[in-house]
Amino acid sequence: MSRVTDRPKHWTTLPDREGSPEVEALRQREFLTPSEETEHPSRREFLKLVGAGAAFLAAGCARKPVEKILPYVKAPEEVSPGNAVWYASTCEECPAACGVLIKTREGRPIKLEGNADHPVSRGGLCARGQASLLNLYDPDRLRGPVTVDRASGKAQASTWGTVDQRASAALKGARDRAGKVVLLTGTLTSPTTQALATQFLAEYPGAEHVIYDAISSDAIAKAQELSYGDRCVPRYRLEKADVLVTFGADPLGTFLSPVEFARDFSKRRRPESGSMSRVIAVEPTLSLTGTNADQRIIARPDHLFPIAMAVAHELLVRSPRAPQAGDAIALGAVRPYPAATVEPEAGLEPGTIAALADELWQARGKSLVLAGPQAAPAAHAVALQVAANLLNSALGNEGVTVDAAARSFQAAGSDEAMLALVERMRAGEVAALLVHGANPAYTLPAAVGFAEATKRVPFVACLSDRVDETGRLADLVAPTTHYLESWNDHAPRPGVLSLTQPAIAPLYDVRSVQDTLLAWARLTGKGPLAATAGAYHEYLRERWRAQVYPAADAAAPFDLFWEGALRTGVLARGGDGAGSGSPRAFRGASLASLPAPGKRPDEGSLSLVLYAPVSMYDGRSANNAWLQELPDPVSKACWENFAALSPKRAKSLNVKESTDSPTMRCDIVTVDVGHARLDLPVVVQPGLHDDVVAVALGYGRVAAGRVGNKLGQNGFALAEATGGRVGMSGIPARITRTGRTGQLASVQGHQYTEHRPIIFETTYGEYQRDPQSGIESHGHLPSMWSRHKYPGHKWGMTIDLNACIGCAACMIACQSENNIPVVGKSLVLRGREMAWIRIDRYYSGEPEAPEVVHQAMLCQHCENAPCETVCPVLATVHSSEGLNLQVYNRCVGTRYCSNNCPYKVRRFNWFDYSDVKEKSLRLVLNPDVTVRTKGVMEKCTFCVQRIRDGKERAKALGVPVKDGDIVTACQQSCPTEAIVFGDMNDPKSKVAAMMKEARGYHVLEELNTLPSITYQTKVRNREEIPA
Amino acid sequence: MSANETALVNVTGEPLLINPNKTFADVNAEVAAPIERKPGRLWWIFFTISVLLTLQFAAEITYQIIKGVGIWGLNHPVGWAVDITSFVFWIGIGHAGTLISAILHLFRQRWRTAINRSAEAMTIFAVMTAGLFPLIHTGRPWFAYWLVPYPNWRYLWVNFRSPLVWDVFAVSTYMTISICFWYTGLIPDFASLRDRSTGWRRGIYGVLSLGWRGSERHWQHYERAYMMLAGLSTPLVLSVHSIVSFDFATSILPGWHTTIFPPYFVAGAIFSGFAMVVTLLVILRKVFKMEEYITMHHLENMNKIILVTGMMVGYAYATEFFIALYSGNPFERFVFLNRAGGPFAWSYWIMVSCNVISPQVFWFKRFRRSLVVMFIVSLLVNVGMWFERFTIIVTSLHRDFLPTNWSYYKPTIFDFSVIIGSFGFFFMWFLLFCRFFPTISMAEVKQVLWNSKKAAGKVPATKAEKIHA
């Protein structure tokens, strides 16, 4: 026997024997760090892997490194770990100013929900509102003030002291030389901020506050001024309209206050209530409202105005009915627009306009004509609004569905003022420009020359959360807080006053815009603000003490009143039901200046329509990955914009797109409007006017951040500025093929149901004869097995296809609630998107004029779940409460469940999506929901964490779970209340009642999967189903 | 074999299976020759390629475990593609071995003797290769052992309703029986090798031969055990692929959910298995100069089976299509029309032309006996059978119930890597087998040789035979 020490060292492969660092590293780690993106390994990496592959088989296991967790040293009083703390606040993602409730856990906001007490949003919250949470944790936010080198646009980190000194010196200089100081903002719905801005500017002679909205409602305000002598954007009351006619307006999508409009709209769309509104959309593109319309009249943007006038012609001239029939100016204005002329011009069927007029007349006083402020060409934009005003007045809608008393403060921007400002800047008349809440360098048409004009302004400061396109032209950027870190108040309309309160201390060295203005005012030292002390919080409180509190007539002392207001988040004064009741008199004179009937543009020229998409709006949150990956509700494409063409036009131009074919390739075309051109991939969009090319705004940012930069092309560049107005529609454009193709990420593989039992629909007339009409049921399906027993709860859901407008708020709500990762364009192209709830959008009928239905699709929680039987390891199991559970820890990842799921609502973690590199983004995760690892299946859980929470709360109180205690995230955010969740075993629950309704059916019922989700048929308010 | 000798027939009227002029010692020497001499250049070339392919396979698996299954081209509706296609393909290849060893043995098809050893080896290596796929296709292969029901303190159990669990049992049983059967058959040959070798080789073959001395008693036990194992294996020929087909048949997916799958899969498996045996033997007899053992007669017989099973498979395709159209089930109907005319039509028509059309040349004796033709057809059949599984899996998944989910499947380089890697892995083992194990059953060939000698009148008749005559 030899000695023990002489024993040979065993080795299996050469790398093993030599013990290279790679091999050693592999030995040390139990799990190897993955990443989410596929890259093909390089040659070097490949060779490494060959070696490592061999070593891998031989190497043993090692322990994970120790990671320590620490408890609070001094626990904050209000925080008990594991319990959410909620704060009421106001969403500042757009000026609609919806009420939100901020859910915080251990001091960090993790979810936004609509505030049910808020009179504007009434509990719903749109996709962008939901996603604004992610902006708080955006790693590309500025972490401190910066100075910018104007020549290069490069930012240099600075300090508040420096920035404040520089700004105040510049402002002082401007003041002392009597230079003009301009504050340029987006719409400020905050009366206190508005007051502060006014006071701030008071010390500068000739100072101006210019309000500019990229997506502007200016034409409405202008037309109101002309027609009624009252510049305002009225409140449109969709819930009072039996007949709603839109002229290119998209109230359900992005116009003015979508959550409010969606809620009002849906109130009139439940046939069970005994009545149902009728919606007619006159529009060139297929807007979200158009997809939900009962009738669409497809017209070019330049024909919207003549059509509106022709409707007036019917009411005033052809068969005079309206009171304005006696108004000579009105008669003179409408006379050039008889239906007989307009219809052939606009390519409408004869009789369309007369029918429209009759329908409106029959619903007079209960109808609403709503024209999009940017739907018509710039030259017609105001005229179209005046025509709408004429119609509303003629129909007696003024004061009822068009409510100027409860006017909207949500859009105060003025194109004229903005364009005039650029002119003044160019003329060197502006000494200092402060920009906040607007990004004119990005959103103004290139032809306006904003960037050039800033060069003539001696001092430009941006108050923004990043060095955006405008910030690059500035001298400094004073970083602002996110609204979840700030104090503010909002008045979206008279009588509604809501508060914004911080739910977290500013993450970085940033300051709210109001605090920055206060600081600068104190440094310049002469204005009314110079004497104030304290932060904006004090200013806000003092203003409320002085103005809001006395008006509120509260019994409690101010401190209690203030706390109460903070708690509810909103003060609502006055009823919500009545309109102003007293219609304003329509001034016929406003018709006098209307443009002459337009000429038809030459053949072959297309009309460009730029529209604000649901996800990107005007591009303000382009760096928000949730929104970038949110598919467009109509086209279902994400991550970039495209040029939409009608099927016929695409054919005649010989361009192809194949987002639902194997290649997913689209031809890239050049959209040329003369002053600018963009190369965009083509999408063939059914329902688009043949003469129209539609391009979404909000893409093509260059200074949004790492997510949002260089995605798509900037549609604003194609806009035109004529006659003091920014035109977004009807811009003559030419399309040429580039010969190149590109891939466009679309989440929907096919656009028609192929007559499968997925969507059932009926008409309102049919529904009244037979509420079950439209449903093809196979009656009783026999089974060999006895049904499951659910002794306690049985959770179920109903989704009303008639209420679902496809706005996708539920998708972002779910993403936020359930920690659903974003995968990026490359993986969406490979069919790897992770959405637990998605909106399937199906077309029916002719591609030229399709009907559309949106269907929220999520795990159906089948009683006979096909996924459950095939899982080899029981990772997906049925609960005694009817839930189809997914046990992530047990999941091996065979994907058999997904293959066997007829609804394909399961999502697989192809890579490790949980490994988020940017630490700030980890803060957005909901600690109640497991972050899934690589290789496991996931899917909708019916928000099982919320079910647990509701049950535990009830148990702690010793009471049974009440209907409505448990609300899923998708249901909570749904602006139209299309989703109802509850206990099917509770006969008094809303969901049980809804399921009993005649419109209910199950998708793919004949598979006998017995889903827990009941869909309700789509009811279209039109007479017959076209063949 | 010279021309006049091939004209000789044995008692059953078939041509002689082996040259009656050979001695038993010739058989030993010639079969053992590849083991006893240094391997030739051709063997090294094949072996090097196989090992390299295996290494890149290992690299792919390592990379995949690090990154995730997402490196493959799989997507949302298409949860399985190359992985399970290759699994079913290799399991199918493995079928011929059992069929040749067990069923042909029970039916006293003596011509199997020359090919059964390599066919069984092929079975084992094919099942080994197949077994890799269920492992690596999972999202978390390090937990794949959870598919085995083992007692544990967490009281976790498998789902016996899941066909994937049935697979675990079916495949592992099949593997076990195949190895036992193969090894039992090898024992007398190991003894022969032991007797011929020296040094450490003698020791190893000595251990492997389990003390075989060729006594009457040994032979009696051996024959009985072999017969029993053949009996045990026979149902497995039907069961394994039936159960593999249940992965699809018990699902609710149109295109998967059909009752024809078990027999259709079994026929297809035998079909592909025989094709692979032909591919291998055509090479083997050339490389190791075994033409005298693996004769044209053997190959022709196998080609006949390929022709028959090919038509069975073709019949199944037609039936499937007919039932889909006849059933009135719109989902089913769509899937089949989509197979033949959709974006994966190329795959469907590769399958039909390789599996149904190409074997039709075997109606002609000239082609049945042409090495070139049979080699090409056998390769085509292998390609076709791979695409059959691909067609079934991918075309059914990529366009299922809800049209919004429809998608396409595009393989990545990693998908190709596992396909060629699996072939490398399989051939690596097979080449090692050729090098160290007798590729032809010497003991059984000697029995056949005796019969041949008898038919050729080279051995005197026994007393019993004389009386009979």
Image: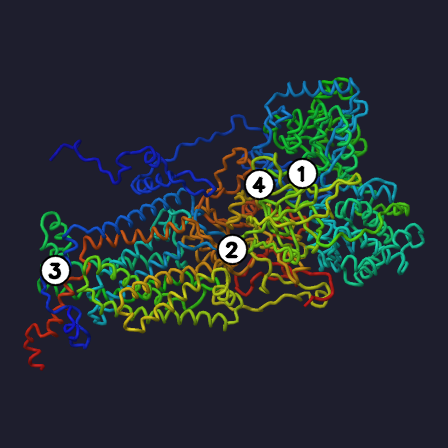
Chain to which the residue tagged by mark 2 belongs:
A
Assign a secondary structure to mark 1: loop
* Residue A625, disc: 4
Crowding around mark 1 (Cα neighbors within 10 Å: few <14, some 14 to 19, many 20+) is many
Does label 4 or label 1 sit earlier along the sequence? 1
Q: State how the image is colored.
A: rainbow
Residue to which mark 2 is pinned: A662
Kind of residue at badge 1? Glu
SS at badge 3: helix
Q: Residue B240 is drawn in which quadrant?
A: bottom left
Along the horizontal axis of the image, is B148 left or right of A838?
left
Residue B93: x and y in percent read 31, 61
Residue for point 85% across, 55% down: A337
Q: Let me know if residue A564 appears in the view.
A: no
Give how far across and how far down residue B128 sits, in percent.
30, 54
| Callout 4: chain | A
Local packing at callout 2 (Cα closer than 10 Å; few below 14, some 14-19, many 20+) is some
Q: Chain of mark 1?
A: A
Q: CA distance from mark 4 to mark 1?
A: 15 Å
Q: Nearer the viewer, residue A266 or A848?
A: A848
Location of mark 3 (residue): B28
